[in-house]
Amino acid sequence: MKSVVAFGIVSALLIAAIARCEVRKPVAPVGPQAIVHFIGDAEYELAHLPMAATRLPDDEEVRIGDELAREPAMYGQLSPSDREDEVYINSVGRRVAANAHRKLPYRFHYVPSKWLVNAYALPGGHVFLGGGMLHLMDSEDELAAVLGHEIEHIDHYHSAGRAQTEAMLRHMPLGQLVGIPVEVFEAGYSKDEELEADREGAILAVKAGYSPRGAVRIFEQLEKLEAQYQRREPPAQSAIEEAARLPQQAVEQYFMTHPPASERIEQINRLIRANKWEQLTEESPLRLPSLAEQAESNSAR
Amino acid sequence: MGLALFLGYEFGGSVAGRVFLGYLAGAASLGSGIWLERRERYRVYARSLIGGGWALLFFVTYAIHFVAATKILDSELADLVLLLAVAGAMVWHTLRYRSQVVTGMALLLAFSTVAISESTIYSLTAGAILALSLVVIVRRMRWFELEIFGILASYLNHFWFLRPIIEPMGTPHHTFPEFWPSTALLVFYWAVFRFSYLSRRIENQNQERVSGMAALLNTSFLLALLKYQSAHPEWAFWALLVLGAVEAGLALLPETRRRRAAFVLLSTVGVALLIGAFAFRYAGQGLSGVWLLESEALLVTGLLAGEIVYRRLGIIAAGISAAQMIIANLGPVLERRLGTSAEPAREIGLGMLFALAAAVFYVNAHWIRPRWAELFESEFDARCLQFFSYLASGMALAAVWLVWPGSGTAVGWIVLALCAALAARWLDSTDLANEMALLATAAFLRAIFVNLTESQAFHHASMRLWTVGFVVAALYALGRLGAIKELEWTRAFAYVFTWTASFLAALLAWYELSAPWTALAWIALGIVLAIAGRRWSRTDLGLEANALAVAAFFRALIVNLEETGTFHHVSLRLLTVGLITVGLYLFSGWGEVEALPWTRVFSHGFTWAGSVLVSLLAWDELQPVSVALAWGLLGVILFELGLRLKSSSLRFQGYVGFGCAFLRLFMVNLNAAGAPGEISPRLYTVLPLALAFYYAYSRHEELKQEKWLASDRRIGAERYLCYLGTITVVALVRFELQMDWVVAGWALLTFLLLLLAWKIGRNIFLEQGLLLSLALLARTILHNFYERSYFPAPFWYKRGVTVGAAVAILFACVPIALVLRDKIASRREDLGSSFERLLGFHRPEQILFFIPLGILTTLLALDMSRGKVTVAWGIEGVAVFLAALFANQRSYRLSGLALLLLCVAKIIFVDVWGLSPSDRYLTLIVLGCALLLVSFLYTRYRERLAQYL
């Protein structure tokens, strides 16, 4: 009799859960995200100890970063107005970096290519911002969020760790890392490192007096770009198709560098709630000199 | 011959001189031949001269009236008398030598002379006389070979005469002046030679054979030349009819009947001519009908007269008439029908003829043969009449096809097959049984290739349904009727018929129903067949039922699960796959064929198939997050059924269902974070599943004494279920809680597991608790201890709070672990496997004490400032020592003392050198107090402590 009752309860609970799901239709991505995230998380955590044990001293990291940043291709051709914009970016960057944990000589470079919708950091404190990325922004808070994100890649030794990994893979002594191509740093980091840089970068920006909404809004811009450039795969039409997609999805998601923008937005919103930053909504306009010049010439016309 | 030509050539000399020279040359040749013939050495040569001499004398005698260049005699009569005289003399003389060669040579030369002369019809009378002479010689001397030569010579001479007349005519021929004389002469030749054939006395077989050949040649040449000179084809019928009648009549003469060979030959020739005659008067169906009647008349005559010749001639005539019907009557219809896609016309007349032929042949094979069995004892006759049975079936087959083209054919054929089956049972006839098989096969193939594509409506249903349905029913009936008791091997036919019926029925369903309903029809038919198979103990029906169910399963898998339509607002997929699944589960009860034990696998297989379908249906019909729940529910139901019915198959399906649900959790449900402010879908979709796993585990535990669960225990089903439950909850905690709070969640789970192990006495929970505590340790070190942010976290996310909570809960586990240790110690047989020993399963209090102790010590080191670390460790050491006293655990006490020693060492080697003054004082004071307390306690309880230490 007891077993009949237990059976009834278990079955009823299962049926009730099914009924609720059918009514509420909760959104759940179908794929190996949970497992991949678990593995990635564990892998990231396991990597901390060896990285910390073989870490470069700060002055050595700065020297290597300076060497890498001297590569002629890094800057592109800067016009006088680009140089003015770079000065402005540096001012924002330094304000954000003031609260960084590691006290490094942070420098901010502008790459005036509209095709570079990216920003990246080199070991030792060099941050590069692409023209394409800059054009997505309309507030200084967004710029602060992006720069804060890159500063935290340096602050949390992500870029130094990348340099260490490359040295190991290329069988190079750590002191000779200047030969590493810049693309290695442009490509991004692991998903956890990116989320960590988002989280810590947003805190850095808030501590510098910026609104965390800047981070949310720039990720919203990136989400729109994702929607434009990524092919949205339709849902699987059969269980076999779904099963067939799993290996591919697992591999794709394991090697995916930047997490989806939606996940990044969700994390920042959680951070806002946890730190009670909901009232920090006021953003400063982007005061790029080139934009001001353009506005002046438009009004003169 | 040269002399003969010479005589015919008008070279300018006198006629009399030429005649004289001719006679002189003939006489010289004859005389020298007679002279030389006496000498043995020249005998052959001499006989040639004799023959040539007589030939020349015969020709010169012929030429003196008939050849213009040598004509000296006006009276034809006188010349004929002379010719007869010469021929008589020639025959008389040559017969003296009794040499067929000499006489033959003489006659050859005589015929040749007639042939080469420029003759009229009347000149051929010489040939007639020669033929007559030859017949006389043949009869007298019994030189029958010579007659063949005579027949050839006579008819060829006549052909030689006709050729210049006929050839210039071209075709068609017209009548010519010499027509009737020529005809008369030919008839004369035939009559002379036929008389010779009939009147001779035969002494041996060789003579009979030669005579027979001569007789055949006689008729053949006569017919050939009559045909050659024919100017009235319409008379051919009468000519052949008369000649045939005469030959047949001659065969019946008493003289002929004494000679069996002559009777057979003339009867055969006569009948052949009588049969052939009708081909010149009738055509098509009429001819076939006449021949059929003629053949039957001959057969009946043969039966009544007891004469094998007529019976065999009847059989042969029947064969010919059948061939004529097939080639000349059926062939064109077949060609016409194959050549057009239009609706074929019914051939009722021809069909009736074929039906008549079929009836006649069936009567011959199955009534006449047994009725007059003694007349058909020879192998040939028996085989022929046996063949008639098959021929009759073929004719019947054709008759049906002719009369009911299109869809009706298959129906007609299967009716014939049924009739054949009934007749075969009645008559115990192997042939009819074979014919039944052939007819049924034809109907089956016809139904497949013609009827299944027929979509025309008939009485509110398609013609296909009516006709193929009838064929199917009839095939099943043949499955019963086809097996004839006395003919054991026909049982195979019965099996084949039911298989073909089932196959055809499946195809009919495929054609007749829309795609989603086909599989349903198959499974329904399968169930009916399975019941019928059991009712009548038919293994074939049982196997067919299984085949249909398998087909239904695969079709549902491939087609129905892809269906997106609706039926009365209900999903067609849900409706059809649901019903098919019910069918498969029902079927599992009947899938086993009693006579074939190996078919038991089907019973299990169909429940597996049903479960697969339900699982896939759930995948298709439900939300992604509901699928794992549905699979879990299915698993619970199957598992419970498996227990109630003691079916390992159902229980194993339940385990697979649980496994799939568990894996699915990681693919979907754990990704379902939900929206802020609502209960997480993870929670309400994962927890019920965990409960389901635990429920199944608990049921196993309840029944662990049952022997029939041995197979489940062999695969470790209990452990599997329990681990599924626990891993599910652990994963839920991992994904549902904030990253830093996971360790606290796991600690609580460890506590609950230990509590369960204690309260319900199941050591598997202790094992899981220990494993989880190890996982907790790893996560704390790798995740929580790692500095994830340089910025101070909110209170509830501080490391001290999250890890502290975990440590506190783990320490709360220690008392339970102590109790469990005692329990385990009291039952040494429960120590478990080497893996459990490795985990420290028998000493859980050690693991569950040292893990939180290590974490706490590290946490204090990380979270306290440099000096405060020592203080914290000191307090920790004292607390541990006190607790150890309470718990009476030596290892704990030693740990507490070790911590205190660590503090002392730290103060001596580290703190005093680097601490700020305030920290230094505080540290020294606290440390001093702690040491004093310990010293006091040690002094106070020295004896007791000595026991503990």
Image (cartoon, coloured by chain):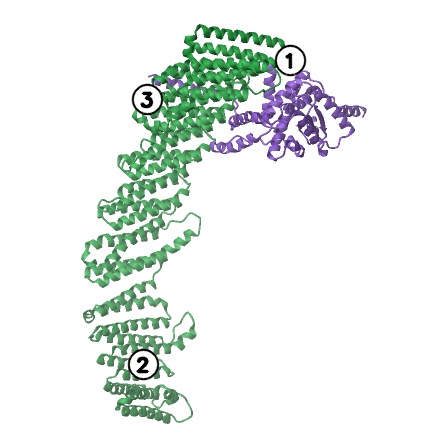
The subunit carrying tag 1 is A
Q: Kindly indicate whether the residue at mark 2 contacts the one at mark 3 (C-beta within 8 angstroms).
A: no
User: Which amino acid type is shown beneath numbered disc 1?
Assistant: Gln
Q: Does B686 sit above or below residue B86?
A: above
Q: Residue at x 50, y 23 (%)?
A: B670
Q: Are marks 3 and 2 on the same chain?
A: yes
User: Which amino acid type is shown beneath numbered disc 3?
Assistant: Leu
Q: Dot 2 corresponds to which residue?
A: B127
Classify mark 2: residues with Cα within 10 Å, few (<14), some (14-19) or many (20+): many
Q: Does B922 sit above or below residue A252?
A: above
The subunit carrying tag 2 is B
What is the letter of the green chain? B
Q: Does B622 sit above or below residue B396?
A: above
Residue B703's disc is 3
| Residue A11 seen anywhere in this rendered image of the structure | no
| Residue A109 seen anywhere in this rendered image of the structure | yes
Residue B67 horizontal/vertical position (percent): 37, 86
Classify mark 1: residues with Cα within 10 Å, few (<14), some (14-19) or many (20+): few
Which quadrant is home to the N terminus of chain B? bottom left
The subunit carrying tag 3 is B
Asked which secondary structure carries label 3, the reply is: loop
Residue A279's disc is 1
Q: Kindly indicate whether the residue at mark 2 contacts the one at mark 1 (C-beta within 8 angstroms).
A: no
**Of the two numbered discs 1 and 2 in the rendering, the one whose residue sits closer to the viewer:** 1
